[in-house]
Amino acid sequence: MASGEQSELIWLRPEYSGRGPRPAHSRVSIARAAVDLADRDGLDAVTMRKVAAELGAGTMSLYNYVPKKEHLFDLMLDLLAGEYDLPDQPSGDWRADLTLLANRLRTVLTRHSWATTLITHRPGLGPNGLRVTEYHLAALADTSLDGTAKMEAFAQLTGFVCQFTDWQQRATAAGDLWLSDLIRYLQTVTATGQYPHLATALAQSSTPTAPDTVFDRDLQRLLTVLVGA
């Protein structure tokens, strides 16, 4: 058995396990077909059979490249990581660099709304993901955080962007009627006097602001907690 051939991690497996003529596909082309399918029909539509059909290939032949569906998801996420528009090196201002990183992730997730599910349920690091991680660590190189804290900050930053983007997409899909009903419900329950702290918080709240403003405000608060002032 070749080294890594039976590994559960696709990055430790050979790119093609079949024999015979030159492979007709690549991991990148397979991942691109799967991403296009998810963009068009949603993540649930991504099956080995449908991806093979997108490529004009037989379903069984696809297993020579991607042994199982979980590996396909890993390839899809890494392809998206390749969409991050990042400079070769951080600027030296960790807050500005991590703000840029968070906004790049938000752009990718807005473009591929299904991706938040994969990132939160099956995170992974392929070649493109390693490039993004290296940028994050380089941005924090001169801070007082140790290696564990830097990696935890990366996970927490990613989680925040995923959660915010997912919330925004769901709220947009629900429409203005959902928001108006929520406001009416909160007004009703706080009028009972059972939730005084909630009533005070709502009374002190300003009018709803644009999602971009909320995102940046919450992001800066998170960065202060994770790294410092």
Image: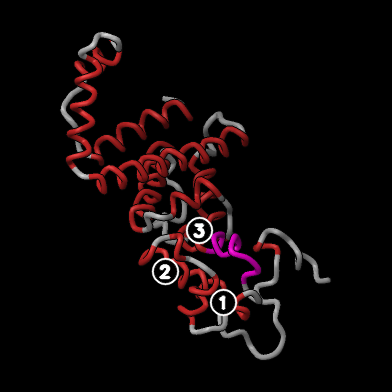
The reply, left or right, for residue 7 in relation to residue 203 is right
Direction right: furthest residue: 1
Q: Magenta segment, principal secondary structure? A: helix
Q: Nearer the viewer, mark 1 or mark 2?
A: 2
Name the amino acid type tagged 1: Ser
The quadrant of the picture occupied by the N terminus is bottom right
Q: Are marks 1 and 3 in contact (CB under 8 Å)?
A: no
Mark found first going from the N terminus, 1 or 3: 1
Q: Mark 2 or mark 3, which is nearer to you?
A: 2
Quadrant of residue 19 within the rendered picture? bottom right
Percent position (x, y) of residue 181? Answer: 20, 33
Residue 203 located left or right of residue 110: left
Q: What is the CA distance from the residue labelled 1 to the residue labelled 3?
A: 15 Å
Which residue in the structure is indicated by mark 1? 26
Q: Which residue is mark 2?
A: 37
The answer to if 67 sits in the magenta stretch is yes
Give the class, few, some or many, for how many residues have Cα within 10 Å of label 1's Cα (few <14, many ≥20): some
Quarter of image, res 164: top left
State whether residue 225 is above or below residue 90: above
Amino acid, disc 2: Leu
Q: Position of residue 123 (x, y in %)?
A: 55, 49
Q: Secondary structure at mark 1?
A: loop
The residue located at (29%, 10%) in the rendering is 194
Whether 29 is drawn above or below 218: the answer is: below
Q: Are marks 2 and 3 in contact (CB under 8 Å)?
A: no
Residue drawn 53% across the image and 55% down it:
129
Amino acid under disc 3: Leu
Disc number at residue 77?
Answer: 3
Magenta part of the chain = 66-75
Task: Return the mark for residue 85.
Answer: none
